[in-house]
Image: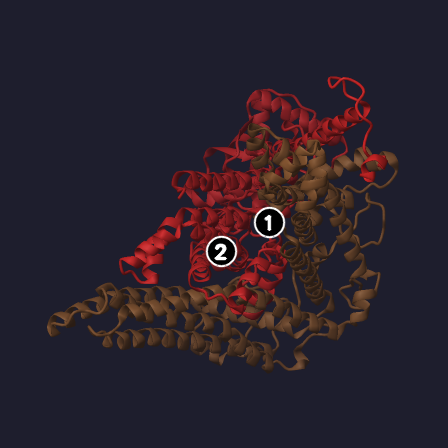
Chain colours: A red, B brown
Amino acid sequence: MTDLTSSDAVPAPRKGSLLTQDARTKQRNAKEARFRMMGLIAVTIGVLSLVGLLTSILASGLSSFQQTYVELEVYLDPAKLDKKGERNLTDIAKVSTFGYAPLIEAAMISAIERTGVTSDVANAKAAGELISKEAPATLRDFVLANPDLIGETVQFDLLAAGRIDGFFKGRVTMESAALDRNVSPEQLQLAQQLKEAGILTTKFNWAFFTAPDASDTRPEAAGLGVAIIGSAYMMLIVLVLSLPLGVAASIYLEEFAPKNRWTDLIEVNISNLAAVPSIVFGILGLAIFINMVGLPQSAPVVGGLVLTLMTLPTIIIATRAALKSVPPSIRDAALGVGASKMQAIFHHVLPLAMPGILTGAIIGLAQALGETAPLLLIGMVAFVREYPAGPPEGFFDPAAALPVQVYNWTQRGDPAFVERASGAIIVLLVFLVIMNIAAILLRRRFERRW
Amino acid sequence: MSTGYITLIVLGLCGLGFFLGRARALATSKATGKKLHSLPNYYGQAVALFTAVPALLLMLAWLFLQPLMIEGRVAGMIPDSVIPEGGAKSLVMADVRRIADGLDALMVAGHMSESDLDAMRADFTDIRNRLGNVGVALGSDVPVPVFEAAKELRKSQNAGNFLMTLAVLGLSLGLLAWSWSRVHPDQRARNASETFVLALLIGASLVAILTTAGIVASLLFETINFFKMYPASDFFFSTVWNPQFRGGSDLGILPLLWGTLYVSFLALLVAVPLGLMIAIYLAEYASKPLRAFAKPAIEVLAGIPTIVYGLFALITVGPFLRDYIASPLGLGSSSSSVLTAGLVMGIMLIPFVSSLSDDIINAVPQSMRDGSYGLGATKSETIKQVILPAALPGVVGAILLAASRAIGETMIVVMGAGAAAKLGLNPFEAMTTITVKIVSQLTGDTEFASPETLVAFALGLTLFVFTLGLNVLALVIVRKYREQYE
């Protein structure tokens, strides 16, 4: 009785109308609105950072799918390429790429004269610098493949130098060229005129997907060929090893394992493995697969094994969820008509759980495809120009991997490599999007609600 | 014979075994007039399993163990006198391996035959040139013992491979014959093959244990080696990190630990409030269409590979912070900084906090909300005073998991935080973390005898213990304090 009357906490009875808010209610409502606003802002920031991330990568990487080429008619001078005139391949092969550079310079000069462009570019060498240092090698490979064409004039699409390519993409400007030892403003002007004359053209950059990596000084020639093959090999190994292992482990844990300490240990182990930092798996790969077993460094087989161990927990967790979602009535029905437990699971439960399992496997693969850190430790950062052989020998050849190639390019000096790295990221993201869409479609198409 | 061909042959035998077993079961049943105990396929399956699995397991074990045994023996052949000043035995062993590979290449190219090789002596013939011809470049002329070791290595490898081929195919054929001879209508073929399959399932589930054991063993083993060369007290308590590849380096973990914790702290400072508010808004306020759009969009952030975030830090966030904040304020001029890495990592962690918290908030029963509304509380008061306290253990667990991610994250800090080991407070300065140093000490040509390389294993072990501790703590908190609603 007394508590009620003496308490100050009880607000005084309302004096005003119910329709007008008193100060405290107003304050509380304002607080509510502020809180709600904060939530909305947080969601906006979250979505905006996704958008910002993607636009920044797209903005700096999309241009790598275009490349400037120089269309030149090169006279394959027999006096320089085959002095003996016997068309003997070993003699022709003795001419190094240095022997081809003058041919390209001569072709460049004649092309400039033909179009009637007047330029301040001083000499043939400076005009030749508009073309990539990779071009003589392209020419040499062509001549070695077609020695009969020596003495004729052949039309080539040669890569333009990285700086010239950068000029048309807006990365190199007249001001930056004035400070640059590798290119002069006069050369850029010449390039501009040649572009108008149609000798320099911009085309879709197929070589970006097929060419191997290139050295520091020729970013225009660098491509993802070896990295895509390396990543594909690793994904193949991961799929072949982790799917059966993961499914087998989950079937045991979900359907057969007795509830005891041993099973508990395995389960805790798996959930912990899922949270171990990826770089620790790299250390494991280095110590066990390379140092102990003696597998070669930078080989897709080592990368595949390491990524398999990393993906296994993801697949196990997804598979167990899929097995759990198959209702017990299916098992009971199978057992009831006389199937053994193994038959019930392999003939009935597993096929019904398959869409869920495959979805999990694809998501695990997507994770493995983007993983970089462990691959750095097992030597996938090496500079690899040779394509690995076909499987299975190719699994043991040195190769690169998509995400590691990105890292590799960001560590180089020339800013043109940043564009390449962003382009490689776009390729990687496209692969990931395809995999995730496949997973979603699979789930939509085959998922059953019981 | 290469392992690929052996595998193919064993698989072929396995298929053959299936048909032979099945055929024999049907034939004997017909001849004796007895009914088969199991379906005919099970007889085939039992034979096939016995043919393939033990042989393949033997091959796997052999591939693991053979290099260990042979290399140990060959390494014993190398006297200390040929090990160059300041070099290590492992480098000489690398030479031995390359010479052995080169000799193989010479054989394949047809420049040399086995009898030539036996007669060949390193001091007489110019090994270096001949190996150079097949693309094996050697730094210096080959000392006699090294060349002898390479010959021995090659010989034992070839012998080992031959023995393995023999053993694997022998085992496969032997078991094929044995299990085929046991096929009989009374044989309980289904039970046999099901027990076999169960054993395989158990084996698969042990891979997880083996992996953990492998991680712990490789980390511990090399860490012990490291502490034999470098005092543990210096490692744990020195504030200087200055590796020198000529020896005499300071390898104190404290600056790295500081960098790791600083970056992770900044990342959590970004991720926890944002993630939590996102979870609250999406669970309590958002309209259905907004939720259907925003929730997957934010979860996409978790699916993006970390290298993408690293590149984002490197080309966008780093230069932005430097040009618009750090330089004008005079706080620093480096584009890689603790703040860059922390900010980008924070974005990466948002979905880790938000989706877990979202699930937990949704698990709080509606009746608790209704009770609070009934007492006159506004929505935000309900959230702050009823829902969050009820969801707290789960939210703390989510934050701890995010923290363990942050500590173990590699690519963002490698590309965004810099490489200078410093103990400082300025977030615009470049600092470095444990993971960055593991990468930098272990990439390139690694030689497993110097403390500068082995320190990476000690760092890895520290990282492993830290993240494991956080994960276990998260698990315990969630299990112990989780509210059980009926």
SS for dot 1: helix
Q: Position of residue A401 (x, y in %)?
A: 55, 50
Foreground of the two, A203 or B424: B424
Foreground of the two, A111 or A26: A26
Is the residue under label 1 in contact with that under label 2 (CB below 8 Å)? no
Mark 1 surroundings: few (<14), some (14-19) or many (≥20) residues within 10 A:
many
Which one is closest to the eye, mark 2 or mark 1?
2
In the image, what residue occupies the spot 66% across and 78% down?
Answer: B82
SS for dot 2: helix
Provide the residue designation for mark 2: A316
Q: Amino acid at mark 2?
A: Ile
Mark 2 surroundings: few (<14), some (14-19) or many (≥20) residues within 10 A:
many
In this picture, residue A82 sits left or right of residue B251: left
Foreground of the two, B311 or B139: B311
In this picture, residue B386 sits left or right of residue B74: right
Vertical comparison of B19 with A125: above or below: below
Q: Amino acid at mark 1?
A: Val
Labels 2 and 1: the sequence-earlier one:
2
Provide the residue designation for mark 1: A404
In this picture, residue B184 sits left or right of residue A441: left
Q: Is residue B456 visible?
A: yes
Q: Chain of mark 2?
A: A
Q: Chain of mark 1?
A: A
